[in-house]
Image: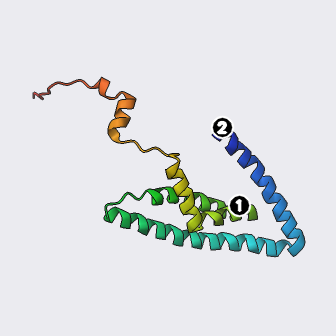
Amino acid sequence: MKAMQILFAFFLIIPFIEIYVLLAVGSVIGAFPTIFMVVFTAVLGAWLLRRQGFATWQRFQSNLQNGQIPAYEMIEGPILLVGGALLLTPGFFTDMLGFACLVPALRRRIAQYVIEHHLLVAESGESFRKKAHFQDNVIEGEFNKED
């Protein structure tokens, strides 16, 4: 299955799940408590996201100062970004997924999986230029500006 098909299915199925869960919870505890819980989870998620993001940023800077590559932190950053977006989306299912993105041990495992299975490939500037054939378009010469 292609990535675009997965995203399409995700954006098609998730709203139906959210509506179902919101209606089910609302019928059990009422409308106002349901709205309060949705707003509360968004506020709590934003607070936790800020703390986790700051901690990840500090580890990133610490690794750079120690001369180490902050590989895990570079992968955890986008995971936190996705988690924050899910937490700000109203609903309980997306909040559950968003809070899962904020669990440090789970984030570290996901980052480790991405690194170990080479799901992201880093390329140096030289190898990128070779692939893009930028070297073929170089014309050597001299330039003199005359008044």
Q: Secondary structure at mark 1?
A: helix
Q: Eyeballing the image, is 137 above or below 53?
A: above
Q: Eyeballing the image, is 10 above or below 53?
A: above
Give me the residue at 84% from left, 69% from top. Answer: 25
What's under tag 2, amino acid-wise?
Answer: Lys
**Residue 19 percent coordinates (x, y):** 82, 58
Give me the residue at 46% from left, 44% from top. Answer: 121
Give the quadrant of the C terminus.
Answer: top left
Check the image and name the residue furthest to the left: 147
- The residue singled out by tag 1 in the image is 94
Taking depth in this image into account, of 73 and 108 the one nearest to the observer is 108
Quadrant of residue 90 in the image?
bottom right
Q: Is residue 80 visible?
A: no
Quadrant of residue 143 in the image?
top left
What's under tag 1, amino acid-wise?
Answer: Thr
Give the quadrant of the N terminus.
Answer: top right
Q: Secondary structure at mark 2?
A: loop
**Residue 12 percent coordinates (x, y):** 76, 47
Label pair 2/1, CB-CB below 8 angstroms: no
- The residue singled out by tag 2 in the image is 2
Taking depth in this image into account, of 81 and 6 the one nearest to the observer is 6
Mark drawn on residue 70:
none
Calculate the distance from the C-alpha at mark 2 to the C-alpha at mark 1. Answer: 22 Å
Q: Which one is earlier in the sequence, the residue at label 2 or at label 1?
A: 2
